[in-house]
Amino acid sequence: MSGPGSGSGPANGDNRLVALDALREEIIDCRRCPRLVAWREQVAREKVARFRDETYWGRPAPGFGDPDARLLIIGLAPAAHGANRTGRVFTGDASGDFLWSALHAVGMADRPSSRRADDGLTLDGVRIVAAVRCAPPANKPTIEERDTCAPFLRRELSILDEVHVVLALGQFGWDAALRALASEVEPLPTPRPRFGHGATVALGRRTLVGSYHPSQQNTFTGRLTVPMFESVLALARDLAAT
């Protein structure tokens, strides 16, 4: 198996699908971070009471969505009992419930909810990835784990040559996006673009947009409301269409 930084540059049409499929296989087979491997597999074995009868995925979560996407959404990492259970990013947890509903409201998802990876959900014009592909303890990857996983994001961006807009969910997603885009835009603007909800910065042929992450910490406290999230998604959608 080749390393996460290997692979080809931009792909088109059927070649893009082939490249994304190859990347998916490398991601789900990855065992490079011992702490993350141990944690994701422990969670999958021990489960929690409400999911005790389910078979957990227990592997890295690959990207999901339209291979011809013009918008890429970057989250932090799979939730222990969300994507680590279902095998699909933002599926099976409260953050995903918030995300799918908003994507449906702005016309980019064919349904407002998704709790299983096999429910037929389809996305139009958007693809979703996690900056770190394995569920981390306490939802906090180490710097070494972050950097080990980073080549996967750079490679996915290089394959997704139709992506015009990158929407970063939270500070972690924003920083991961900047690091990934730095390989395309050198040097990055000075001072370094600062994260904020609705922040927008042009980086070469792509535009980076920031949003608060739809975590329960933000949605339950009102830091991120439904209108706020739908508004920033609509902004990203419209920028991607231009």
Image (cartoon, grey):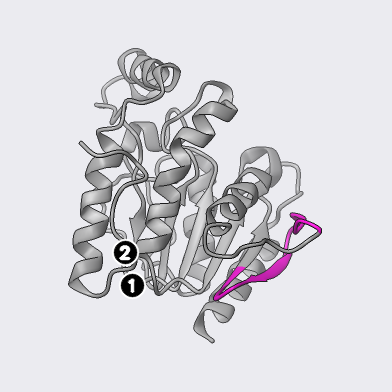
Q: Which residues are magenta?
A: 191-207
Pinpoint residue 66: horizontal percent, then vertical percent.
Answer: 33, 66
Pinpoint residue 146: horizontal percent, then vertical percent.
Answer: 53, 34
**Res. 203 visible in picture:** yes
Residue in the picture at 35% in, 40% down: 61
Residue 47 placement: quadrant: top left
Q: Residues within 10 Å of mark 1 (few under 14, many from 20)?
A: some
Amino acid, disc 1: Asp
Residue in the picture at 24% in, 59% down: 19
Specify the farthest residue to the right. Answer: 191
User: Does the magenta-highlighted stretch encompass residue 194?
Assistant: yes
Specify the farthest residue to the bottom. Answer: 242
CA gap between label 2 and label 1 equals 13 Å
User: Does the magenta-highlighted stretch encompass residue 145?
Assistant: no
As rendered, which of 150 and 198 lies closer to the eye?
150
Where, quadrant-wise, is the C terminus in this rendering? bottom right
Relative to 40, 238 lies left or right: right
